[in-house]
Image (spheres, rainbow, N blue to C red):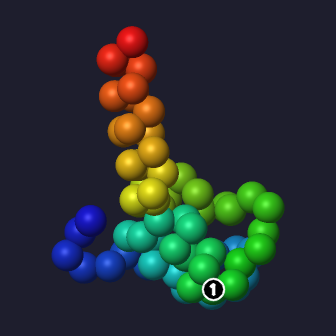
Amino acid sequence: MSSSPAYCTCPEIKQTVRIDQGEGECRSQHGCEQTCCPLAAEFEPDRFNFLIAATGSSFRAGR
């Protein structure tokens, strides 16, 4: 993550949100329940999803 937070205005909730966090963190922080996040591609990867992906790829490599 960068040392200074990046911000963007979310068109769904009409609020300024930090995009140097994960989408899940943003949803929790703002109480967002939108089905599709219009800023999904802008967020840092969620730490949890990154760990799952990293673990899954190591399992596949071990087969």
Q: Amino acid at mark 1?
A: His
Q: Residue at left 40%, top 59%?
A: 47
Which residue occupies the foreground of this view, 49 or 44? Answer: 49
Image position of 6 with respect to 22: above or below: below
Q: Quadrant of the C terminus?
A: top left
Of all residues shown, which one is farthest toward the left?
3
Q: Is residue 8 visible?
A: no
Residue denoted by label 1: 30
Residue 22 in percent (x, y) is at 47, 65
Q: Is residue 20 visible?
A: yes
Residue 3 in percent (x, y) is at 20, 75
Question: Residue 29 sits in which quadrant?
Answer: bottom right
Q: Residue at left 69%, top 84%?
A: 31
Image position of 30 with respect to 38: above or below: below
Callout 1 secondary element: helix
Query: How many numbered discs sit on the rendered protein?
Result: 1
Residue 53 in percent (x, y) is at 44, 39
Which residue occupies the foreground of this view, 36 or 16? Answer: 36
Q: Is residue 36 left or right of residue 4?
A: right
Q: Residue at left 48%, top 51%?
A: 49
Residue 11 in percent (x, y) is at 70, 74
